[in-house]
Image: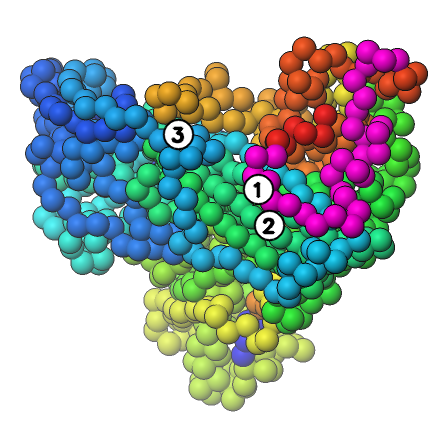
Amino acid sequence: MTAVMPDAKLLGEDIDRVDGPIKVTGAARYPADVTYPGLAHAALTQSAIAAGTIRSIDSRDAQAAPGVLTVITHQNCPPLADGPVTPLGPSPRFPLKDNRIVHHGQHVAIVVANTHEQAIAAARLVRIDYEETSPVLGIDNPKAPVSRNPWRMDSGRGDIRAALAAAEVTYDERFTTPAETNNPIGLFATVARWNGDHLVVHDSTQWPMMARKALAAVFAIPEDNVRVLVPYLGGGFGAGLRTWPHVILAALAARLAGRPVKLVLTRPQMFSSTGHRPQTSQLLRLGAGPDGQLAAIDHEATSTVGAEEATVEPVTVVTPLAYACPNVATHDRQVRLNIPNPGWMRAPGKTQGNFALESALDELSYTLGIDPVELRLRNYAEHNPQSGQPWSSKALRECYRIGAQRFGWADRDPAIGSMRDGRWLVGYGMAGVTFGGFSGPCRASITISRNGIACVRSAATDIGTGTYTIVAQLAAELLGLGTSQVCVEIGDSDLPLAPQSGGSGLATALSSAIYDAAGNLLRAFLGLAAGDDQSPLHGRRPGEVTATRGRIHLAGDPSAGQAYTDVLARHGLVQLSADGETNPSANGGMAPAGAFAARFAEVRIDEDLGLLRVTRIVSAVDAGRILNEKLARSQIIGATVMGIGMTLFEETVFDPVTGRIANATLADYLIPVSADIPDLDVVFVGEPDTSNPIGIKGLGEIGIVGVAAAIANAVYHATGRRIRSLPITVEQLLGAPGAAWARISERSAAGPPAPVPAARQAPAAATWRSGQTPSSDPGRNCHGGF
Ligand code: MOS
């Protein structure tokens, strides 16, 4: 018997978060809330230079400060093994390995004291004498080493050179995106406690199994000796996908202090210690026919990485999958700088890559006079264009159609600067989104006990996305229970293996494992009942039964059955358990599709002030089967807000001389506030996916992708200003310093002093060149269109 979904009553229902009440009442324990008797507190001392060595370090004053238990620096740090190579690269370089400094804000000491305040005060007393060298900073720095990214994601099909040379129109432009920093509201925290050679760590991780692996490797103890707990996390967005050095330092501090230790990062330390979205520079060369058919996509991306780190920003990873283009080449390169190591931030790489590709397509639509939606439909990838395999599901066409309908795309006057509302220029823009599928191996177990409660267990995490709730809904559905009869135990590395809550892959992996476990558990119950000659299910086989209302019964006759609790009682059992697993490597010849989306944005721009307001965004999303529309909508809305942040505000600024992050506070690092966020309409289209039994396609990240391009495209429609560099600031909208904002009315009046916007002087020629062979000019300025 496979687990069946009898009446699909609970799945898809907008039930509230099952963990909502304990979160809003403060009962949920986040890593920073954990305490132990005898808990000591740690604080970090960070490097004030970006490159060089520590000539000497004097921790005597810190050590002598009130309440201080121990101060650990590279001088007294015991040797530790390197962390393991993970799917996301090795653990970051351990900062106390030696006296070298590779970035500003590198941890150089950890101080442990009786109280938090004592630790912070003492951390300031650690005196360091540096031998400073000139840091390598700036993505364009010729001194910076450049390499292919270690994932070797360069890909290709067809003959890109020939296709570009032969194309009717070609395009050759550069896009840039800044560094950005995840700002989960929950400050990352680690509480570590040793018991002999056993280590328990409460940590803000999105991947307990990986944290366990890393800690076991570093401290050279068996993985079974390490337990990582994270029942609740105050946001992750990718910042929790690596076992960062501070986690290892906290565990080391606990070991050396002989006490449980808590370390909570400060907000500025979050900027330097838990990764950031790296800066990128992308060169996009395209060729197309007069009908808008793409002939060539050549996408080269450069992203920044730390001086001695290995992580990867997959900027071009989705490019080969997005359109039915016969000739595609992608190149992902890395520039090594003395910056805190980047990490992953919601839709890493994909969201920047989409900005470039979908902006370029918008430009093509103006060049050829083809509606932007129509242009995308002409290049629709019916099959996975890289592998040729059929998609496991794809409703992107419906996303375009329904999204356009809800948005009112048909009302758009395609002429630039043609729509206005009083003093505001109005622009409509759109973008398509192909996300790509990911899933990992996962296990789950389910136990039904004499009290009728089913408990689902897996080492997955809920990073605020709603895992607890969808697991409860799914298990209830599969086992014929109410959600209040399901308990969910996750966020513990001692539980059955689960992949990271990341890459939009957990819901698919975990639900597949639960499906398998539920089927096995139903079979186990039926096995008992079928062998019991007193049972109404005596002799029955899996295909004949189903489960509803806490009972297993004949599919056609709910009265002919037995409650789970009766089966347990009759057989003298306290509980019955079953395990389940999924290993997504076998995909049956299908290309796991991942989610798709179409985004439509409306902007209003004040001509005089360069004010830009995003006034509407419609997101039509194909995420397969939606388990809980309320939560799914929350994911898309939250990610769209993050997308607005990426487009209009966010930028992590590295001081070009010192390498210090100049805006590492929530006062200086701009993120949207409620007043920046308009009505966000979300509609789900699409059918259950065929690559997994429940039909899910993860949607944790897709909500951010396409926002930047849709807004930038709307800005172009309103103003004729093509923005290829994020964020879109007032300065960019007003053009080069000193230049006046040209009113549409002035421009059409052809008054000599008004600068002529590129759009008015044949926007096509500015970027798409007929019959020209594209050149590679890395120095091309992204503001060249003004
Ligand atoms: Mo996300 S960057 O996969 O947490």
SS label for mark 3: loop
Q: How far apart are marks 2 and 3 (CA)?
A: 24 Å
Under mark 2, the amino acid is His
First in sequence: mark 1 vs mark 2: 1
Count neighbours of disc 2 (C-alpha within 10 A) and say few if under 14, some if 14 to 19, many if 20 or more: many
Residues in magenta?
Answer: 751-780
Q: Distance between the residues labelled 1 and 2?
A: 7 Å
Which residue is disc 2 drawn over?
Answer: 299
Q: Is residue 32 above or below residue 317?
A: above
Is 399 left, or right, of 46 in this rendering?
right
SS label for mark 2: strand
Which residue is disc 1 drawn over?
Answer: 282
- Tell me if label 1 and label 2 are in contact, CB under 8 Å: yes
Disc 1 CB within 8 Å of nearest ligand 1 atom: no
Which residue is disc 3 drawn over?
Answer: 137
Under mark 3, the amino acid is Leu
SS label for mark 1: strand
